[in-house]
């Protein structure tokens, strides 16, 4: 009943009940050298064709596979003319905006975080509006929540009062995306990613980075000094599920969507200590010590687990990996890479 009311309300506001799902043919991924981008680009090239996925990079160099499999272009989302030029040149109809400053770096440089995550994203939206693009995908994060939010099974609709600049930009980005959808008919979609764990490119500047670094250190040195307490529980997701989620949301028929820029997506939740125990099943002499730093307070302000029933219902979200299947795969992949 409540959901129906919200649907009617949204449809009434935007007056676009007849908006159609436009086709996705040529995609620009900004931030392609990052943790998600460097795996998303090859994944998308398999689906949409190598030449149809343009890897946008800025300062950081992506892995070789990105250069070897398709077009790569330097693009700065904070420079509107630069962005427009790339979109025109490559005939882009969809932008996946992964260029962002994460939570820990954002606390060290809040103005840069605002500039990239908000002004950059606004350029992406304006470009999409003026050029009538098919889709904009702008991931949000568990960082959209704050200490006043219920931490267990965090609802889809809840208090959004983050304490980090990264979180502020994520909440504002969700609102701005939904605004562009209703006001201008730009098909903007986004999902609140938990911490993402992966083996290709390490994350940079996030609070959940410990859950990736622990694997590298366990394999290389058999020990890890963790920057959050052992009992810190956060929601996490393995990269293959994160990629699937993004494409499934991007491809969902628009008429099935009630939400747009702010889907909760859950997968697994565990403490740093539980993750260390899981790794010990493969590397018995692995040792973890904890020395919490400023990132502890950030982690403490985020949820432990998420209610993702809206994503399940509206676009069929269902994760595949759990802590044990992920750990087995991570250790196999990283051992090949590091040893
Ligand atoms: N992984 C991100 C961070 O830790 C959260 O979205 O900042």
Image (tube, helix red, strand yellow):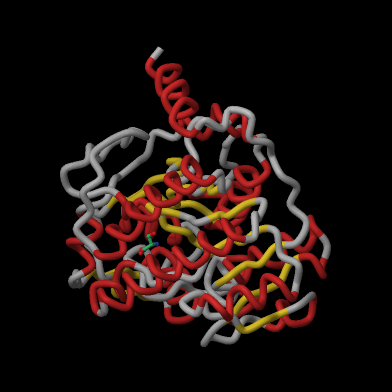
Quadrant location, ligand no. 1: bottom left
Query: Could you say which is closer to the camera, residue 302 or residue 110?
Result: 110
Residue found at x 67% / y 76%: 86
The residue lying at 52 percent from left, 46 percent from top is 184
Q: Nearer the viewer, residue 330 or 51?
A: 51
Identified at 60% across, 43% down, the residue is 249
Q: Is residue 203 above or below residue 160?
A: below
Q: Quadrant of the N terminus?
A: top left
Residue 155 occupies quadrant: top left
Q: Position of residue 209 (x, y in %)?
A: 39, 68
Percent of width and height locating residue 17: 58, 28
Above or below 171: residue 78: below
Residue at the image point whose x is 56% and y is 43% from the top: 185
Residue furthest top in the image: 1
Residue 50 appears left or right of 233: right
Rendered location of residue 245, percent (x, y): 59, 47
* The quarter of the displayed image where residue 58 is located: bottom right
Position of 89 relative to 277 (above/below):
below
């Amino acid at each position: 009943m409540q959901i129906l009311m919200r649907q009617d309300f949204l449809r009434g506001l935007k007056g676009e009940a007849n908006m159609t799902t436009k086709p996705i043919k040529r995609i620009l991924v900004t931030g392609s050298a990052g943790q998600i981008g460097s795996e998303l680009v090859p994944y998308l090239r398999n689906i949409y064709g190598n030449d149809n996925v343009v890897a946008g990079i800025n300062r950081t160099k992506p892995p070789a596979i990105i250069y070897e499999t398709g077009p790569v272009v330097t693009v700065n989302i904070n420079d509107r003319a630069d962005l427009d030029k790339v979109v025109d040149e490559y005939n882009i109809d969809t932008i996946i905006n992964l260029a962002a400053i994460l939570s820990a770096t954002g606390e060290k440089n809040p103005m840069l975080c605002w500039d990239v995550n908000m002004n950059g994203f606004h350029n992406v939206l304006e470009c999409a509006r003026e050029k009538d693009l098919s889709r904009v995908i702008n991931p949000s994060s568990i960082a959209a929540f704050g200490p006043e939010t219920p931490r267990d099974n965090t609802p889809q609709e809840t208090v959004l009062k983050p304490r980090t600049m990264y979180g502020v930009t994520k909440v504002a980005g969700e609102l701005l995306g939904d605004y562009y959808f209703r006001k201008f008919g730009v098909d903007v979609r986004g999902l609140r990613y938990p911490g993402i764990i992966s083996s290709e490119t390490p994350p940079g500047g996030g609070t959940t980075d410990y859950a990736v670094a622990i694997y590298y250190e366990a394999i290389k040195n058999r020990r890890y000094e963790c920057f959050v307490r052992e009992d810190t529980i956060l929601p996490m997701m393995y990269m293959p599920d994160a990629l699937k989620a993004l494409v499934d949301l991007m491809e969902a028929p628009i008429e099935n969507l009630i939400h747009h820029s702010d889907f909760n997506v859950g997968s697994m939740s565990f403490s740093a200590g539980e993750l260390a125990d899981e790794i010990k099943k493969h590397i018995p002499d692995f040792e973890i010590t904890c020395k919490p730093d400023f990132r502890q307070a950030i982690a403490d302000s985020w949820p432990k687990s998420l209610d993702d029933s809206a994503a399940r219902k509206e676009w069929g979200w269902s994760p595949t990996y759990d802590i044990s299947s992920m750990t087995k795969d991570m250790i196999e992949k990283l051992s090949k890479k590091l040893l």
